[in-house]
Image (spheres, helix red, strand yellow):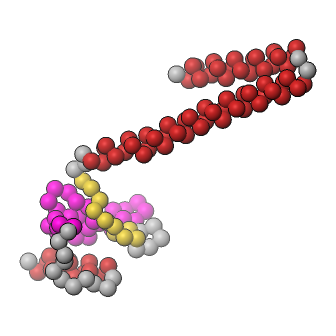
Amino acid sequence: MKHIAVIPAAWLWFSSTASAAVQPDAASTGGLFQVLLGLILVLGLMAALAWTLKRFGATRAAGDAAIRIVGGVSVGGRERVLIIEAADQWIVVGVAPGRVNALATMPRQEHAAPMAAPVAKNFSTWLKQTVEKRNAH
């Protein structure tokens, strides 16, 4: 497949050098402009294809996943706390560079249902209350 892309580029280079040998300098500038225009066109098509695959290709794969990320919050420069849904459970995990630690597990909750307990002012308080509730049962 790489050879197919090299053939048009080599042909353009040879045709521009051959025309430069026969014609004056104005024609070689036109050949160089033609090569640059072709290069920009090919790079633009590659970028558009990559964007399209990224935009529409990942959506199909994420819909069939057995595990999904419900939500998350950044707690530091490179640290995050995520809620991951697996089957009928939510798993709260801490993610840091090179580490993933399970912090707590809880039954799956509905997004639309309001929380029975009052909402904590910050995440760490909420997490502490949730872990205490889990350990109490």
Q: Quadrant of residue 5?
A: top right
Residue 18 lies in what quarter of the image? top right
Along the line of sight, the residue nearer the viewer: 47 or 79: 47
Q: Is residue 55 above or below residue 114?
A: above
Q: Position of residue 107 (x, y in %)?
A: 14, 67
The residue shown at (24%, 53%) is 67
Q: Is residue 41 above or below residue 13?
A: below
Is residue 105 shown left or right of residue 100?
left
Magenta-span inclusion, residue 41: no
Up/down of 68 relative to 72, above or below:
above
Query: From the viewer's perspective, is 13 left or right of 131?
Result: right
Q: Looking at the magenta stretch, what is its main secondary structure?
A: strand
Residue closest to the eye, 131 or 30 = 30
Where residue 99 appears, x then y in whole percent? 37, 62
State whether residue 41 appears in this view: yes
Image quadrant containing the C terminus: bottom left
Residue at coordinates 33% horizontally, 82% vertically from top-left? Answer: 122
Asked whether 105 falls inside the magenta stretch, the response is yes
Is 68 or 135 nearer to us in this picture?
68
74 vs 30, nearest the viewer? 30
Query: In the image, residue 22 lies at what x, y percent?
Result: 88, 14
Q: Which residues are magenta?
A: 83-111
Q: Position of residue 10 (x, y in %)?
A: 69, 20
- Residue sticking out furthest to the left: 137
